[in-house]
Amino acid sequence: MEGDLSGACQLSDAEPADGEGLAFRSPRVVDGARIHELVRSSPPLDINSSYCYLLLCSHFSKTCLVGVLDGRIIAFLSGYIPPEKEDVFFVWQIAVDANERGRGIGKSLLLEALRRSTRSGCRYLETTITPSNRTSRALFRSLAKATRAAVHESPCFSEEDFGQAGHEAEMLIAIGPIEIK
């Protein structure tokens, strides 16, 4: 993404918390190493370099979120606005600490990202998911149901597109239009 995002949809700077002490905020550079470890401990997510997470925490901090509980980062969502689709919020990765899974934190993180991005014009969410990742598929279908939005699935990247043995195809999941107040 090039240039200023002020005209595109982005996450607002507000940091509401739920009743259980979980707060959401934009990531900071000092969070990069913890985010890298969180993703590393969250298979089947692809692990990117530490440098990548530092860039997400600095260059893309307005479109990424961390979930903080008792001063610890327990969840991370990376997302961005595709250059040619200013009304789409694309979720790249979402990770929740293994000790905190099963409590709805991933869905809360997605809903918070949508709340923030729809304030500035996003009406659709997109992501890619491998066919075997049942957990992520269920999470995004649950999100669509909660927002009363349609879900469309289509091929995005084939196994051959990755140029490496062992990476599954990725399906594009598109949810929307979404209206969150």
Image (cartoon, rainbow, N blue to C red):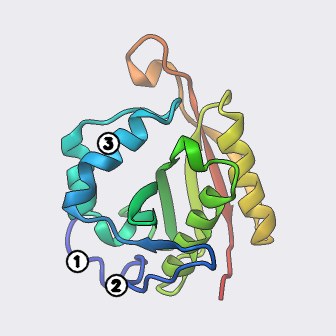
Residue 165 x %, y %:
44, 10
For label 2, the SS is loop
Dot 2 or dot 3: first in sequence order is 2
The CA distance from mark 1 to mark 2 is 7 Å
Mark number, residue 66? none
Instruction: Please name whichever residue, 130 or 3, is drawn nearer the observer in this view of the structure.
Output: 130
Q: How many marks?
A: 3
Could you tell me which residue is drawn at 68 percent across and 75 percent down? 178
Q: Is residue 173 visible?
A: yes
Could you tell me which residue is drawn at 30 percent across and 84 percent down? 6
111 shown above or below 36: below
Q: Is residue 79 visible?
A: no
Q: Is residue 165 left or right of residue 118?
A: left
Residue 51 x %, y %:
18, 43
Residue occupied by mark 1? 4
Residue occupied by mark 2? 7
The CA distance from mark 2 to mark 3 is 30 Å
10 Å crowding of disc 3: few (<14), some (14-19), many (20+) = some
Residue 102 x %, y %:
70, 49
Mark number, residue 36? 3
Identity, as a three-letter code, of the amino acid under mark 2: Gly
Dot 3 or dot 1: first in sequence order is 1
Is the residue under label 2 in contact with that under label 1 (CB below 8 Å)?
A: yes
Identity, as a three-letter code, of the amino acid under mark 3: His
Q: Is residue 141 left or right of residue 112?
A: right
Quadrant position of the C terminus in the picture = bottom right
Which residue is situated farthest in the front direction here?
A: 70
